[in-house]
Amino acid sequence: MDKLLLRVDEAAELIGLGRTKTYELVASGQLPAVHIGKAVRVATSAIEEFVRRLQADTRSPNNDTEARS
């Protein structure tokens, strides 16, 4: 069975980001996480939603990158 909750370092590897950047995303609330005691875990569903939001933002017509092209 696949894990439903990942450690932040596991989530970082799955997303392709560094551990520090992933902790920053969790701390800012951009990547939702759950706290179980002192443990911080990221739901795989939260990672999938985070990536969907990034893709949607990239495709948005108000995106600065597209405006410069």
Image (cartoon, rainbow, N blue to C red):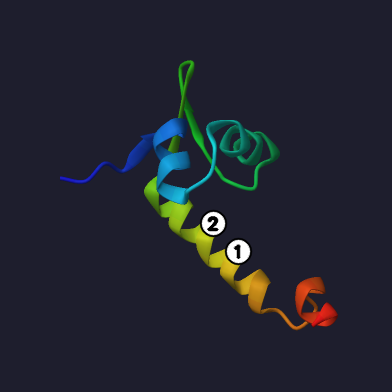
Q: Residue furthest front?
A: 69
SS of the residue under disc 2:
helix
Q: Amino acid at mark 2?
A: Phe
| Callout 1–callout 2 Cβ contact below 8 Å | yes
SS of the residue under disc 1:
helix
Q: Quadrant of residue 68?
A: bottom right
**Residue sitting at 59 percent across and 33 percent down?**
23
Residue 50 is tagged as 2
Q: Taking 56 as reference, is 7 left or right? A: left
Most foreground residue, 40 or 55: 55
Q: Residue furthest top?
A: 38
**Residue sitting at 61 percent across and 73 percent down?**
56
Q: In whole angstroms, how far apart are the C-alphas of marks 1 and 2?
A: 6 Å
Most foreground residue, 36 or 60: 60
Q: Quadrant of the C terminus?
A: bottom right
Q: Amino acid at mark 1?
A: Leu
* Residue 5, percent from left and from top: 35, 38
* Residue 37, percent from left and from top: 46, 17
Q: Is residue 9 above or below residue 32?
A: above
Q: Quadrant of the N terminus?
A: top left
Give the labeled residue for mark 1: 54
Question: How dense is the environment of label 2, judged by Cα within 10 Å: few (below 14), some, or many (20 and up)?
Answer: some
Q: Is residue 44 above or below residue 24?
A: below
